Image (tube, coloured by chain):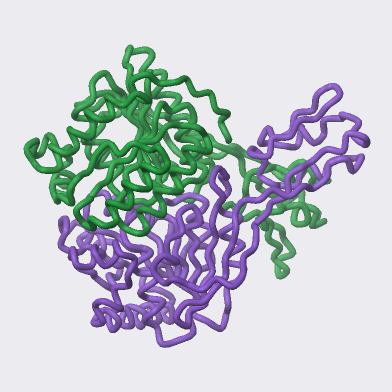
Amino acid sequence: MIISIASGKGGTGKTTVSTNLALSIDQEVQLLDCDVEEPNSHLFINPVIDKKEQVIAPVPKIDLEKCTFCKKCMDICRYGAIAVLKKDVLTFENLCHSCGGCFEVCPENAVIEKERSLGEIEHGTARGISFIHGRLEVGQVMAPPIIKKVRSYTDPNRVTIIDAPPGTSCPVIAAMNNADFILLVTEPTPFGLHDLKLAVETVRILDIPHGLVINRAGLGNDDVKHYAQKEHLPILMEIPFDKKIARIYSKGQMVVDKLPEYKVKFQDLFRKIEQLVEKGGQNK
Amino acid sequence: MRELVILSGKGGTGKTSITAAFASLAENRVFCDADVDAADLHLILKPDFKFSSEFKGGNEAVIKPDECTQCGRCLEVCRFDAVKFDADTNTFEVDTIECEGCGVCVDLCPEQAIDFPEVVCGQWYISETRLGPMVHARLGIAQENSGKLVALVRQEARKIAKDKNLDLILTDGPPGIGCPVIASIGQATALLIIAEPTVSGIHDMERVGQLSRHFNIPAMVCINKYDLNPDQTKKIETLARESDIAVVGKISFDQTFTESMIQAKTIFEYNEDSQASIEVRQVWDNILSRPEFKNPVTNNIMQHL
């Protein structure tokens, strides 16, 4: 079973829920941190890393000996990453989306695949959990290929928990697509509600069963609850607004370690998710 | 003309609340919400929409079933696994969520059986607010090209600043360090990183700091909720000093931010005597007196998009 933990708004508690849930379940668990722009899960579960790999994307390099300057590569590229001049060809790696069009279309085989590094992936273990995360290289823009690569290691024999990035665009979709359940984490504030609505729209497009965790409950107002009721979004857990929890988090500690009563609450959350997945979701 | 871009790396550290607070203090300015994915600044500034336009950010491949001969060439050339073959019906179809809009299948289909319509990826707006003009946008759900939309709203904000003779653009940036963030910092005068004193806040602040150095844009740091963890606050101050980033102030963990947000007000409109208001005012004065902001160096980095 794949559970993707998402939010729309950043900083609502995705990582807190992902890591604490992962540590509470009495089954084999795999935690995939797919917030590759700002991965944080490792700071809380402190995995021992045993394997690293680069994520690379092919970009074009032109063999000027073979090139006849026919411009077919430039014409097929929608990203302006190739400029064919009279006697030279310029390529702009940062604009390239690695679609492969230039390799396909060159009649002279003059476009060679060169590797560009987008980031890296680390594999490890922490307290019995299998852990993998990706990290986008600073200055690079393409997060989805790294997310897809992390997800390619999904182990069907384990419960897979995905810590997704914030937002609603391509990286979020890459972290949610084909999950069995999406757990949305929000906070009861106007910003939290506004971005939750966007996240719910996203989940509905993907047509995946989903439910809600309200973090910092008691902080703002009841509008999130009213919205959840109206939209038949099941509220599966509430974590109260408590400076004690904020301080635990600030030190990189786990809530379930410092406040053991939460372990049962996260187990209960997991049971509710299992039930909803079995039913095919409350919202279908 | 100067532009201050407010970033954080990590989400939820207070970018938008602090940008809105600055809105009450800044003069001669235009506001720009560059978090087009999950824009929130309008919830406080309550804009009066004056102009709205569609954002066409790209194209999408659509296979015409009547003209398709099931040769499978599109599936073979697509590097994004967006072409799906249904063996039961013997049909090929493009999954619009996976489609990158590269058009390779369109160009290489031997039957020219693939259409490539432009897609509306979002909306963008020019508005008036009680505190000044604002440019903002909404990226369509599950759409691509947030970077292009960010570049567009910033360009429009620049135009307004020029037309109305305003000398400051206040830009509320997106979280992360990827595509939309890079689109939001090119040619900025300076970045203000809102950091929180938590292990993840520090980790993410460091990554934004690296990004600012990578693109050679000056950065400053403001520590929000600094009293949550004094040790981590000290750590941020040390790290900032080591990387030549000025700490322009510290703001308390103050619920005034949430209370004013609920009333759709800036913290100054809600309670100008609150602890947070006093501290934010100090931060703003410090930013205005920083040399990198007072005497900006023209920055012509290449747009990486």
Quadrant into which the N terminus of chain B falls: top left
Report the chain shown in green.
B
Q: Quadrant of residue B278?
A: top left
Residue drawn at (84%, 21%) of the image: A86
In the depicted view, which residue is nearer to us: A6 or A232?
A: A6
Look at chain A in the picture and name its colour.
purple
Across and down, in percent, residue A62 comes to 83, 38
Across and down, in percent, residue B188 comes to 43, 28
Across and down, in percent, residue B221 comes to 33, 40
Determine whether, in the image, residue A8 is placed left or right of residue A82: left
Q: Is residue B117 visible?
A: yes
In the image, is residue A275 above or below residue B54?
below
Across and down, in percent, residue A140 comes to 57, 45
In the depicted view, which residue is nearer to us: B277 or B140?
A: B277
In the depicted view, which residue is nearer to us: A206 or A148?
A: A148
Quadrant into which the C terminus of chain B falls: top right
Q: Is residue B105 visible?
A: no
Residue drawn at (90%, 40%) of the image: A107
Residue drawn at (23%, 82%) of the image: A261
